[in-house]
Amino acid sequence: MSSVSRGVTVVSDARAIDDLEARRVLEDVHARSSQQLFGFARRLGLTDDEAAEVVQEALLRLWRTLRRGATIDDPRAWTFRTTYRLAMDRHRLRRRWAGFVEGLGGSDTARLDSIPTSSPDELIAVWAEVNRLPPRQRQVLYLHYRADLTFEAIGRVLGLEASSARGHAARAIARLRDRLGPEA
C-alpha cells in the first residue's frame, strides 16, 4: 500500500528504501546541488549562516523522509522546494519577532537593530517569559506571533471575540514590557 503527495510516494511494505539507498540519494543531492542550494538560500535574503543552516536542515529532512520509506520522484527539486520553504519560514519568524518587539513598546529602529532576530538565545529568553504568563494570554501570543493567526482567527480557535483576543494580547505585552524592561 502506498500514498502519493507532491512528488513523494510513501511506501508501507517491504519495498521501502534501505539505509544504503537513502545515503546514496542524499550524497548525490549534496554533491550535485549543495552550492546551488546555498546560493539559492542567499538569493532568498538569508545571511551566510542562515543559508548554511537552511541547506543543512533541508538535507536532513530529505534523509528523514527517505528513511521513513518515501520514494521521492525528484530529490533535487524536493530539496530546493524544502530550502525555499525553510527560508520563507525564517522571514516569517523575523517579521513576527519584529512585530513582537514593537508590541513590547519599541518601534524605533535602533531598538530593533539591537536585537538579532535570528538569535535562538534571544528567542528562547523572550518565549521563556511568555511561558510565565497566564494561560489565555500565553495562548493568544503563541497563536498570533508563532502561528501567525489574526485576532479573528484566534477568537475562533479559543472561543472568544476578536476584541477579547486583542485585549489578552495587549495585557500580555504590557506584562512582558514590565518584566523585560526597556533594554529587552
Image (tube, rainbow, N blue to C red):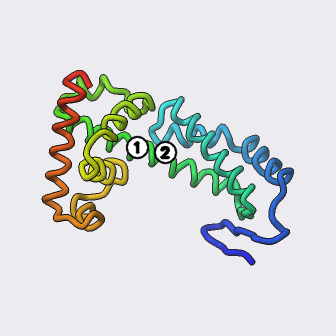
Secondary structure under the numbered disc 2 in the rendered image: helix
Tell me which amino acid carries mark 2.
Ala
Residue located beneath label 2 in the image? 87
- Determine whether 137 is above or below 158 in the image: above
Q: Quadrant of residue 182?
A: top left
* Residue nearest the observer in this picture, 145 or 9: 145
Q: Kindly identify the residue that appears in the image at 73 percent across and 56 percent down.
A: 66
Residue located beneath label 1 in the image? 91
Single out the residue that lies furthest toward the bottom: 1
Q: Quadrant of the N terminus?
A: bottom right
- Tell me if label 1 and label 2 are in contact, CB under 8 Å: yes
Q: What is the x, y in percent for residue 143?
A: 32, 54
- Number of callouts in the render? 2
Q: Residue 66 vs residue 180: left or right?
A: right
Q: Is residue 7 visible?
A: yes
Q: What is the x, y in percent for residue 29?
A: 73, 47
Q: Kindly identify the residue that appears in the image at 27 percent across and 63 percent down.
A: 158
